[in-house]
Image (cartoon, grey):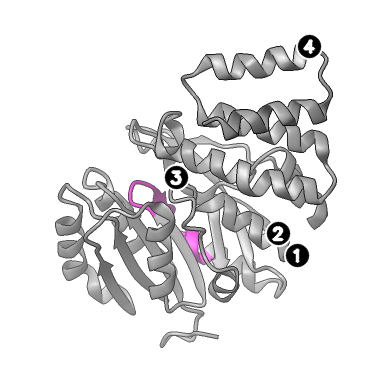
Amino acid sequence: MVECETGLPLVTVVVITYNSAKFVLETLNSIRSQTYAALELVITDDCSTDATVDICRKWIADNNSRFSRAELMTVCKNTGISANCNRGLDAAGGEWIKIIAGDDILEDVCIEENIRFVLSDPDIKCVSCQITVFSDDVCKCNQVDLRDDLFELPQKKQLRYLLTKGNFIVGASVFFNAQLVREMGGCNERYPMLDDYPLILKIYQAGKRFYLLKKPLVRYRVHGCNVSLNPNSLFSVSLWKFYDEVISCLLLEHGMFLHYWHAKVIAVKRRFPENGNVFRKLVRAGLSMLSPVSYVMVLEQLFDAT
């Protein structure tokens, strides 16, 4: 167990930033205000073109004594969210890791509550807390329904849901064991803008699971630059590739052929968000009473032609 001078498990808070100058001070101040003492801070910036790096460097100089260690990492080329997360994971010295984007906010008791939760049961290695969503007004937050019932399901049923329905675990809510994440290989950089879903799925494939901490401990900021909220962004490209290359293959492996067909449809829809003609071809194919196998053949031909 990695411990600091207090005897408590050391927690590394990894802040991932990219052009976060407008919000990053709120993020950093929320980390400084944590009631949990044994903290290490790693800020990893993905080649911001605004004042993010200068703001973070000055903040660390002013607040370095709050942490057992505080580090700012920069790169000369933008690499995407997954690679940025991995740099933070590689630099983390704590036993437990909390990753937060440079525009979100931790409640003051976030780390303390997560540590109390994981220490209550040695089987708990991955936690998802409840979150609230806010925009310009930090004081006006709406709690997000994380589908508490899904966390009560057996591990295999949770895995099936991840494959057939999508990711039900919000990346901003996650708190996990550093050793486990390293064993999983960290985030998959083949999907540069999709850091959470591939890693979460890999954890479930390894027979592990997430446990729900029923307390709202993270505030997720919604604004015009959220990558996941832009249907035409690089996030969509990463998502359709992941559905096409990973989800669909796992569905076939588990014999879930109809779900495989549906995953292919989603992949095409994500790949061509502005091309209604492609998706209409799929609809017409379905309406023409093609079997699921024939439907998959149509999809494969569309992929091969692009």
Mark 4 highlights which residue?
Answer: 288
Q: Residues within 10 Å of mark 2 (few under 14, many from 20)?
A: some
Verify whether residue 244 appears in magenta.
no
Q: Amino acid under label 2?
A: Tyr
Disc 2 marks which residue? 204
User: Contact, CB < 8 Å: mark 4 with mark 2?
Assistant: no
Do the residues bearing badges 4 and 1 touch, measured as CB atoms within 8 Å? no
Residue at 31 percent of width and 78 percent of height: 69
Kind of residue at disc 3: Arg
Direction from residue 193 to residue 151 in the image, left or right: right
Judged by depth in the image, the label closer to the viewer, 4 or 2, is: 4
Q: Nearer the viewer, residue 163 or 66?
A: 163
Report the disc number at residue 221: none
Which mark's residue is nearer the viewer, 4 or 1?
4
For disc 4, the neighbor class at 10 Å (few under 14, some 14 to 19, many from 20) is few
Judged by depth in the image, the label closer to the viewer, 1 or 3, is 1
- Amino acid type, label 1: Gly
The answer for how far apart the CA atoms under marks 4 and 1 are is: 41 Å
Secondary element at image label 1:
loop
Q: Label 1: few (<14), some or many (≥20) within 10 Å? A: few
Which residue bears the numbered disc 1? 207
As drawn, 305 above or below 159:
above
Task: Find the distance from the CA under tag 1 to the CA under tag 3.
Answer: 29 Å
